[in-house]
Image: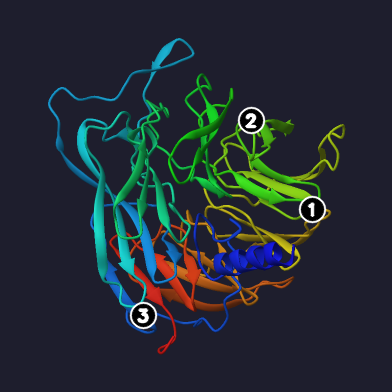
Amino acid sequence: MPILFLLLAAAVAAEDANWPQWRGPRRNGVSNETGLPLEWSATENVLWKTAIEGRGHSSPVVWGDRIFVTTDIEGEAIDGASAPKHIRDGEVYLHPDSQSGDRRHTLKVVALDAGSGAILWSRTAHDGRVFDNRHRVNTYASPTAVADGERVYVYFGSEGLQAYDFEGALVWSKDLGDLPSWGHGQGTSPLLYRDVLILQVDKNQGEGSFIAAFDRATGREVWRTPRRERINYSSPLLVETRARAEVVTTSYDVVISYDPATGSELWRSEGFLGNAVPSPVASENTVFVVSGYPDKVSRAIRIPRREAESPAVLWEYKKGSGYTPSPLLYDGYLYLVSDKGMLTCLEPETGTVVYEGGRFPMPSFVRASPVAWEDKILLAGEEGDLVVVQAGPIHKVLAVNSVGEPIIASPAIASGRLYLRGASHLYAIGARGR
């Protein structure tokens, strides 16, 4: 038993030292790092800056001396290629901002050296026609990868799920079939739980949607549970309660918790009747779910402690949330971020407003999710402005920075550094000598 405890403790420590997946070790945007600089610019406290070809909103993931990002390089139009027709309420549906399904796309996973920013290798996961359109703001490389020290796992929607070793060799590849998304593209990121990779795959109106687990060593499908949930863009969250582990998913119609070992449904609660884009966060006993469109809804759901118990909605707050930024649960407070960078601070137990309307210092649109470290919160604006705010019950701006290019991808923190993905470059921010 002591040996097992030591092994588990070592695994947790290794995970905490890295940023291995969407929103970090616990998928909540929180880091234990200290000593990060408060101020930087395109040159100050920039340890390195590396150009990344193509476009991608996936966050960088970090394991040891490796950083991984995915990217989409758009090419020429393909004769005869077109996105599938989507039927909605008996009529053909085409979103006015839907595009790019008629062009060649080269989808890549790129590995960089964390120390120098040098590109170590680049592998092509897909090259050619894509199944569906994407929203003009989205990319075909928006889901964030997962790394575990041996392999990096990348998800490109209809264009597949792949695993590469740290030297760039393809370990396995899965074709998940055609995944219609109303021509908006994908956004959900895979989740690693013990020996399986869990993926939430929702389609158009819900027909054919599912959540599935794949053996991380071989790609073999371990379990699959059908869903009736329409396309959404949030990522599943692993919640460790005293009783069990759960995977919580959000969607338009319903919030569902699953057993990560079997895929069995554990409980469900009402959804938003709105788009599920922000990912949930959780304490040991409560999960916090958020939607920002068409209505702004944030809700606290008490997780059932026993099988016969039902989830209870503790409170609901109908302001403050944005279309894409996920909430932040940090040091006793729950933070919401609006599309314009307004910060709202709530007491997570009661939903009581601590403050609201904490302003972004300049006009901006925020798509990235916040991250936190050492009593500080970082907000990244689409125009490239980055604001450091004091965590706690009083809103105070500590620093305003810029890297001089747009930022949509959420930041990563590891080994005393802040990693920022801009429209064209990946930046390592840190104090010299770290």
Q: Is residue 10 left or right of residue 244?
A: left
SS for dot 2: loop
In the rendered image, the residue lying farthest to the bottom is 433
For disc 2, the marked residue is 273
Locate residue 183, reporting x and y percent: 37, 30
- Alpha-carbon neighbours of circle 1 within 10 Å: few (<14), some, or many (≥20)? some
| Callout 1: SS | loop
**383 relative to 127 in the view: left or right:** right
Q: Earlier in the sequence, mark 3 or mark 1?
A: 3
Residue 402, compared with residue 433, is above or below; it is: above
Q: Nearer the viewer, residue 64 or 207?
A: 64
Q: Judge left or right: residue 150 versus residue 361.
A: left
Which of marks 2 and 3 precedes in the sequence? 3
Please name the residue that numbered disc 3 is placed on: 46
Q: Amino acid at mark 3?
A: Val
Please name the residue shown 57% across and 76% down the image: 33
The percent coordinates of residue 97 (x first, y second) are: 35, 35
Provide the residue designation for mark 1: 351
Residue 77 horizontal/vertical position (percent): 15, 34
Find residue 390 and name its label: none
| Real-space Cα separation, disc 2 to disc 1, in angstroms | 21 Å
Query: Image point 33% across, 35% down: which residue?
Result: 159
Res 313 visible: yes
| Figure check: 226 above or below 303 | above
Report whether 178 appears left or right of 348.
Answer: left
Q: Quadrant of the C terminus?
A: bottom left
- Contact check, label 2 and label 1, Cβ < 8 Å: no
- Does residue 359 show up? no
> What is the CA distance from the residue labelled 3 to the residue labelled 2?
43 Å
